[in-house]
Image (cartoon, rainbow, N blue to C red):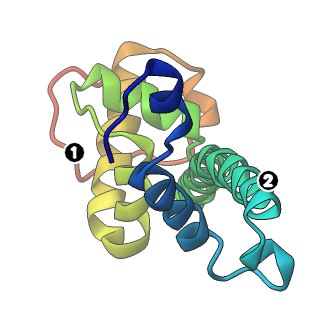
Amino acid sequence: MVFLTACLFGKGKGPDEIWRKRKIFKLAAHFIGRRRNCYSIAIRSVTRALVYTTKARKLKKLDMQDLWTQRLTAAGEEHGINKKQLLEGLTRCNILLNNKTLADLAIWEPRTFKSLVDVACTRIKIDRVYNPDNLDIPPNTVINDNLD
């Protein structure tokens, strides 16, 4: 098709419209009724669905962080230390593990997690960060020269 004037050029939508509509209809393929077949309704539904998925990705991250915190708290209390003390002791020992890794260790490698708790507890006692009476465990498995 040859466009002789700029006015006629603006009216021709061309093949781009087909692909734009096809993209929307692909995203609306699992909808029911007119939301699937009618373009103007499909655009609204697809836009709303994409907004919800964007929010859901952020909420999923927050849910996972809460889950890791809960698991770390439970695993630490099982060994007589709270999460804050555990993370403080590990940081002072330059053991830089994040919450996800520690929660996975608590579930799948309980002996490794127990040894990390012992190291953190010993370091807290050496540095006298918290009241030593609050810590139940005097770990004998950690060898150190600074503990009284």
> Which one is in front in this view, the residue at disc 1 or the one at disc 2?
2
**Relative to 124, residue 46 above or below:** below
Q: Secondary structure at mark 1?
A: loop
Dot label at residue 81: none
Question: At 56% across and 44% down in the image, what residue appears?
Answer: 81
Residue 12 visible in rendering:
yes
> What residue is pinned by disc 2?
44
**Amino acid type shown at disc 2:** Arg
Residue 148 visible in rendering:
no
Q: Is residue 120 left or right of residue 25?
A: left
Q: Secondary structure at mark 2?
A: helix
Measure the alpha-carbon separation of dots 1 and 2.
62 Å
- Local crowd at mark 2 within 10 Å, few (<14), some, or many (≥20)? few
Question: At 31% across and 40% down in the image, what residue appears?
Answer: 2
Question: At 79% across and 57% down in the image, what residue appears?
Answer: 40
Q: Are marks 1 and 2 in contact (CB under 8 Å)?
A: no
Seen from the viewer's position, the closer of residues 119 and 59 is 59
Which residue occupies the extreme front position in the image?
4
Residue 88 in picture, x, y percent from top left? 44, 25
**Amino acid type shown at disc 1:** Val
Seen from the viewer's position, the closer of residues 29 and 76 is 29
Q: Is residue 115 left or right of residue 104?
A: left
The quarter of the image holding the C terminus is top left
Write down the quadrant of residue 124 in the picture: top left
> What residue is pinned by disc 1?
142
Write down the quadrant of residue 37 in the picture: bottom right
Seen from the viewer's position, the closer of residues 56 and 4 is 4
**Relative to 148, residue 3 above or below:** below
